[in-house]
Structures are given as C-alpha cells and as structure tokens.
Image (cartoon, rainbow, N blue to C red):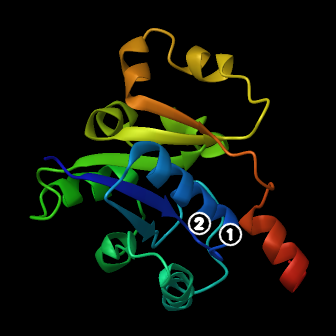
Amino acid sequence: MTKKFGIFGGAFDPVHEGHLQAARLAQRELTLDKIYFVPFNQAVHKAQPRYSAVERVELLRRALQSYAYMDICLAEIERGGASYAVDTLEYLKKQPDFTDADLYYIIGTDAFEKIFSWKEPVKLLTLTRFIVIFRPGYDFARIEQMFAGQEKFLDQIYLIEDAGRDISSTRIREQTFGF
C-alpha cells in the first residue's frame, strides 16, 4: 500500500494552533500516514523570519511532541539558501522513505492563490497534490480562474474547510511581541 505523506512548508515564525489545526484536518480528511513540517531557511515571497532557524525548529519540536504522525523535515534549512517548494519536493522524492509515497502539500488559500508566482509552478503541480485549507465563505471561483487553461491540475487539489478561529503568525507576533 502506498504511503501518503503531508508536506507542510512555511516559516513557522512561530508555529501556532492554526498550523496544528490545518495538519490535523489534512490528516483526518485524507488519512495521511505522516505529516512533515518543513521550516524554510530563507524566505522568497515574504519577510525573513524573526526567529532563527534553531529557535523555530525547537518551537516546532515542542508543538509536535504530542502527535505521533507529525514530524519535522530539515531539508530546506540543511540545504541553505533560498527555499523553494519545488526543490524540496524533488529532493524528498529521491529519499528512500519518500520514493514510493504520494505527497500532499498542505497550504492555506492565501499562499495557494500565489502558486503561479512560485518557482516552476507547473513542475510543482506535477510533483505533489495540494491540500488547500480554506475559511467558510471562500469563493472557489478564484481558484478556478487561476487554473483557466490548465484545468487538468484541478484534480490535484483537495479543498478542506477550516471553520475554526482565524489565526495567523503575523497576528500572534503583533499581539505577543508588538511587532
């Protein structure tokens, strides 16, 4: 039986309940065997993290310790330089534990709507399926419009509603640290 792994990339600056909720939803809805949190090394599409890689990894370790199906993948930090999902997925697909696994990239709608600005987006869409976590009331026509002319990729996208609280790392930093 083919294993199903979730890949959850991001800054995790800091990791918070919204990240864990998205991972739990993805695992429950698609019966993923394992979810790997992949903290990026160097941001490409957003500001650099306020916490160092060491601090972010330690915060992730603490947050994930209660979940046997959640783990950390340090591929992007160990590789160094700018972090690109397509490079990470290509790397993972060559690793023994991942070669025969189906990969599902967990992402929120805000980031997914920018997917065509990512490095080699068409290649990325062939390397993985996407689990897109959305809030109630999200307009799916936006995703359909994004894929006009490339509808074949719509079958690679799983949409999961998260009716929980709207939590963002930015808001947590602002409330906790004042920046």
Q: Quadrant of residue 130?
A: top left
Instruction: Name the residue beneath numbered marker 1.
Output: 17
Give the camera-side residue of 87 and 104. 104
Quadrant location, the C terminus: bottom right
- Rendered location of residue 162, percent (x, y): 68, 46
Residue depicted at 62% across the width and 74% down the height: 15
Left or right for 159, reference 150: right
Residue depicted at 42% across the width and 62% down the height: 83
Q: Quadrant of residue 59?
A: bottom right
Q: CA distance from mark 2 to mark 1?
A: 5 Å
Instruction: Name the residue beneath numbered marker 2.
Output: 20
- Rendered location of residue 116, percent (x, y): 49, 33
Is residue 55 visible in the rendered image? The answer is: yes
Give the camera-side residue of 2 and 171. 2
| Amino acid bearing label 2 | Leu
Element carrying mark 2? helix
- Rendered location of residue 141, percent (x, y): 66, 16
Give the camera-side residue of 89 and 106. 106
Q: Could you tell me if the residues under marks 2 and 1 are in contact, i.e. CB atoms within 8 Å?
A: yes
**CA neighbours of label 1 inside 10 A, class few (<14), some (14 to 19), many (20+):** some
Please tell me how many numbered marks the rendered image carries: 2
Give the camera-side residue of 148 and 165. 165
